[in-house]
Image (cartoon, rainbow, N blue to C red):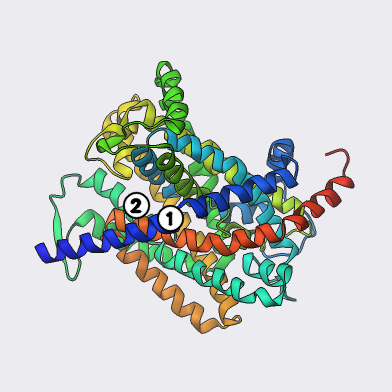
Amino acid sequence: MCGSMNAADTINAMLKTVDDYVWGIPLIVLILAGGILLTARIGLLQVRKLPLALKWMVKNEEGGKGEISSFGALCTALSATIGTGNIVGVATAVTAGGPGALFWMIVAAFFGMATKFAEGLLAVKYRQVDESGHSLGGPFYYIERGMGPRWKWLAKMFAFFGVCVGLFGIGTFTQVNGISSAVLNFFDPDGVNTIAIPLFGEYSWAVVISSLVLAFVVALVLLGGVKRIAGVSQVIVPFMAIIYVVFVVILILCNLSRIPDAIVQIVVGAFRPRAVAGGIAGSMLIAMQNGIARGIFSNEAGLGSAPIAAAAAQTHEPVRQGLVSMTGTFIDTIVLCTMTGLSIILTGAWKQEGLEGVQVTTYAFQQGLPFPEHVASFILMLCLVFFAFTTILGWDYYSERCLEYLTGGKSRPIKIFRTLYILAVFIGPYMTVSAVWRIADIFNGLMAIPNMIALFALSGVVAKEVRRFFGSRKSD
């Protein structure tokens, strides 16, 4: 037992070293600089045209080519972004980086809206639509077609990391781990009812049953392809987002008197070193690193995932889809993550020793909502289960599109990948929380690098498209 613990500690230490290297100053600067550059080149479009973007978000374009509606493409993208990042990721960021991490998460999201706009625009501009209406597009195509064939190696690098992110990162382990933790905390918090799982150890029946049910339901949906994924997402995502917002608003209203102090903690913590949970020395760098990394994990701006869904939208106007894509970051981080972070800070959940991941947000709901603790836990568990479930579906779609690009559209590798994906969903609950999040962070960072290089290179194309589109629409 001691040997296995030492091995686990060694693996975690190795993952932490790689994670710190990948998500070091260079990548943080690259992502923020990209968002700032694009914000300047499109003239604060995320502020000036946000009302128009929100209007077009629910108003589908008629007569455009593609597989699913613009709203369906947005919901598919949101299904992948609204997940454990909004509930568990925010808790992890604030616990590790202090309240200041939320400030940097919001800052990154503001510039990330410009990044997401550019991604959606380029996805539609450079996508490939065949005679049957099947769409394939995303960073791999705007790298190859926009930057030129000699950059195809960079496109393939992105696609490879995209497959890995889905299979080992955001798509499977982190989501399922979040679901199983929430189910365990609600149904068997003391871990009394357990069973020995060969190769993994002893786990609660709640974890085992939830992983089996989840893997089965995921398999049923994935067999239906993108249209079934989009159909499920269009129903679940808006409904659960509204439910979650309603309960968090109730929590905030019940703790209104604490809001001024929470805002001070967020702003001061973003710039001034202070002690954070567990006695870890906090700093501006730690707050930035955790806030930006978890923000990217949540809204995926700069990651290059959302444009894969945007490329399937039934539209003929790249700028319009860019605006619709941009609303995803606004909803995901500036609205939902901010509300979660406020809940955690208002209730002091981030300072509770011994809590990690979903336990932090669960504590916030239990202490902040005017309901019995088991009711608050059930509400959060339900939201997390559905959010994470749709993220699993969305990331399978992303990864399959990346694999389709790598293999030239061959169906056999995709079928094999789908089987492996479902298997990863099943084993996700048996991964340790710290290892799961570090693996996700590493692949996130690696995926973001080729995409951000492309966004820098094609920023002039984005600016030109914006001038062309709005130059002919003076009324907007």
Furthest residue in direction left, as rendered:
1
The amino acid beneath tag 1 is Phe
Q: Which mark is residue 35?
A: none
Q: In which quadrant is the N terminus drawn?
A: bottom left
Q: Nearer the viewer, residue 39 or 305?
A: 39
Furthest residue in direction top, as rendered:
257
x and y percent of residue 98 in the render? 37, 35
Q: Nearer the viewer, residue 60 or 252?
A: 252
Q: Is residue 82 visible?
A: no
Identify which residue is drawn at 64% across, 45% down.
36
Q: Please give the residue where the numbered disc 2 appears in the rendered image.
A: 179
Give the mark, 1 or 2, whose residue is nearer the N terminus: 2
Badge 1 marks a residue whose secondary structure is helix
The amino acid beneath tag 2 is Ile
Q: Which mark is residue 389?
A: 1
| Residue 305 left/right relative to 313 | left
Q: In which quadrant is the C terminus drawn?
A: top right
x and y percent of residue 471 in the render? 88, 46
x and y percent of residue 226 in the render? 57, 65
Q: Where 471 falls versus 226 (above or below)? A: above
Identify which residue is drawn at 14% across, 56% down.
194
Q: Badge 2: how crowded within 10 Å, few (<14), some, or many (20+)? A: many
| Residue 93 left/right relative to 143 | left
Mark 1 in CB contact with mark 2 (< 8 angstroms): yes
Identify which residue is drawn at 43% across, 55% down.
389
| Residue 245 left/right relative to 67 | left
Badge 2 marks a residue whose secondary structure is helix
